[in-house]
Amino acid sequence: MAADSESRRNQTRIARLPPVAGAGVTAGGLSLLGFGIAAVDVMQEQGAGGVTRVVAGAALAVVGLLFTNWTWPPWGRPSRRQTSPDQEEPFEMEGAEVTHAATAQGSTVAGAPDTPGGQAPTGPAPQQSDGQETTPADGRRPTPGIEAKSQAPLTDPKTPDDVRITTQARIPETDPTLGIKVNPPDESSSPKHRLVVLGDSLSQGFQSLAMFNTDLSYPAIIARELGCYESFRHPEYLASGGLPLNLEYLAREMERRGGVTWWEEGSAASDVDDLLEKIRHYWQDGPGCVVPSSGGILHNLAIPGCDIRDLMTMTADAAKDRLAQVENARFRDRSGNAGLLLAHRILASARDPETKRALTAVEAATVLGNDDRIETLIVFIGVYNAIGPVLDLQVRWSGAGYDDPIEKRKRRYNMWRPTHFEAELDKLVAQICSVNARHVIWATVPHVTIMPIARGVGGKTRQGSRYFAHYTRPWVSDEEFDSEHYPHLTSQEARAIDSAIDQYNDAMADKVRNARKEGRDWLLIDVAWLFDRLAARRYGLDQTARPPWWEPYELPDAIARRTPAPDSRFFASSPEGRTQGGLFSLDGVHLTTTGYAILAREFIHVMADAGVVFPDAQDERQEQPAIDLSRIVARDTLISKPPRSITQDLKALGWADERLNWVAQLGRLL
C-alpha cells in the first residue's frame, strides 16, 4: 500500500510540472526530429546517424507533448481520454487525500479503489496514514477506506446527495453482540412464545413467486429445532401451488401438457390462461377464499412485499379495504396485489384481545410479548425498501410521501434514500422497544444486486471490480443484450444501490449497538455478509474482485455433495438434471428450500450463542444444534427433481414474463 501511495504521489508531482517545462521538452524533441529527417534526406552517407536522430527526436517530442497535456493551462487544456460511464477512473492520490478530477454534484465516494485491499473484519484497525480505515474509541465502524469526492464514472447523476458511494465492499459485522456485553437475561421462567418473526416474504418461505410449503420457511425450520413446531402458528397454502402463482408449479403443469418446450406450442397461451383460471377459482371463489382459524395470533407475522412502514401500518382491515377496490378485476390483475391477499390472511388473527381492533404486525408482536413474554423476536425487514430497482430495472429514489401509509404515494418509489430509511427505522426501533422479548435479533439487508433476477452482462467494468457493465433479465444473453433495446441498470446504479444498502446496515448496527449499551439483549445477524459469501458471479468466480475479508461460505455436506454444488446463479436444468443455481428459486429473488435451510442454520447459531436452548431427541440441551439438512434438501423439489423446461437459456421463464409480467408482480406485492 505504501509503495502504491508513493507511485501515485510521484504521478501527482509529474502532473504539477510547470507548463514551460513541457513546452521546452516538446520544442527540443521537434528540433531533433527535424535534424534527423534532414540528415536522412540530404546526407545519405550519414543515414545511420539521421535515423538515430529521428528516433530520439520523435521520443522527446512525444514525452514533451505528454507532459504538456498534463500541465496545459486550464483555459487551453485539450480533452483527455473520456472514460466509459461504466468504468472506474483511477484515483490521483496525494498523501491521505483522494480526489477525482471531476466531482459529481453532491455525491461522495467512500473507500479505497474497488480492488483487493483493506482490512480484515476482526479486531480493531491499526492507525494508518494512507487512507485505510480506523476504528474510533466509541466502537462505531466508519465507512471502509477514506472519504473522497466522486467522479462521474462512479456515480449515476440521479443518485441523491445522501448516498455515500463506496468503492470498497463493506466490512461485515461478524460478532452479533458488536463487542458489547449485556447482563444475562432472567431465565428463571420460560417465555410462552419461543419464537416470533417480523419481516417480509423472505421470512414466510416465499419462493418461485408463491407462498407454499411454509413449513419449510426458515422460521419454521428454527421452530422445529427448538422443539416448538407444533405450537408455532404460521399460515399455510397447500393447494394450487400457493399464492399468487408458483412458477415451478406452472412449469411442471405445462410440461405435462406440452412437453419440455411447452412455450413453443401454439396452445401454450390458452393452456396457461386455463391454469390461471383454475388457480383463481380456488383462491377467489373456492375453499382458498376462507381464512382458516389459527387459534391465536400467528407467530410468523411476516408479510410478503412489506417494507418498514408496512410493518407499522398494515392491518387485516386495511388490506381488505384495498382489496375491495380491485374485487372485480381479473385474477391476473389482482395477483399484482397478491401481497394484500396474503396480508389479510396473515393478519386476520391479529386482533386486540379486548376491543377486537385490527392490529399491525408490530402491535400483534407486542400483544404476544405481553402474554407471558417472547423468548426470541426476529426482525428481518428492509429488502422491500431496496428490491424495486432490480425488478423494474430502473431506480426511483424516495422523495416526498415516502412515509405515507397511503400506498399510492409511496409506490412511486422503489429505492429508499438512506436518510429516509433511517427515519423509518427509528420509528420501528421505538416500537420494538415496547415488545417484551428476551432476545431481539435484527437481520441486515442483503445486497439485492447479487440476486440473480438481474443478471450482469458485458463483463466486469474492469479487473477487480464487483460490478458488471449492465444488469438485465436473466434470459437475455450477453450476445443478445443491446442497451438501446433492453431495459437495464448500469454499473453506477448498481453501485449506488449497494452503497445505500451499506448505509441501511450501518444504521441498523448502530441501533443494535445503542440498545446493547442500554442493557437490551439485541443482536445483529449480518445476512448481507452471508449473501456476499454465497455470491458466485460477484466473488466466487472472480478472485480479483474479492475483498480481503471474503471467504466462500462452507456449504454443509448434505448440500455440498449435490452435483453440481448449489450456487447463487439463476437456476437452470437439462434433461439430465440441474446444471447450475439451486440457492435461489425460479423468481430469482427468494431462496429455495435449501437456501432457507442455510439461513435458518445461521440464525440458530446466533440464538444458541445467546443462550437459547435447542433440545435433542432426549430433551437435553445441544451445545451445537444441527439441522437435519438431508430431510430438508430431499423436500427441495427444484434440487431433487428439477423441471426439465427451465433450461440454460431460460426461454420458458422469459416467455412467461412476456405473457404474465410476473417479475413486476414481485415488486407490487403491496
Image: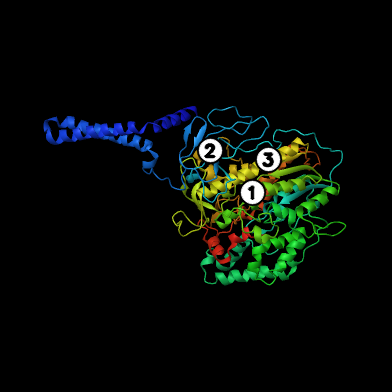
Q: Amino acid at mark 2?
A: Ala
Secondary structure at badge 1 equals helix
Q: Which residue is mark 1?
A: 595
Spatial distance from mark 3 to mark 1, Cα to Cα? 24 Å
In the image: residue 117, left or right of residue 334: left
Taking depth in this image into account, of 606 and 112 the one nearest to the observer is 112
Specify which label sits upstream in the sequence, 3 or 1: 3
Residue 198 visible, this angle: yes
What residue does disc 3 label? 509
Q: Is residue 74 left or right of residue 281?
A: left
Percent of width and height locating residue 504 = 64, 45
Residue 290 sits above or below residue 162 on the image: below
Which of discs 3 and 1 lies nearer the camera? The answer is 3
How far apart are labels 2 and 1 at the CA level? 38 Å
Question: Which label lies toward us, 2 or 1?
Answer: 2
> How far across and how far down the image is residue 36, in percent?
19, 33
Residue type at mark 3 is Ala
Residue type indicated by callout 1 = Gly
Q: Is residue 78 shown above or below 295?
A: above
As drawn, the residue found furthest toward the right would be: 354
**Dot 2 lies on which element?**
strand
User: Label 2, on which residue?
Assistant: 148
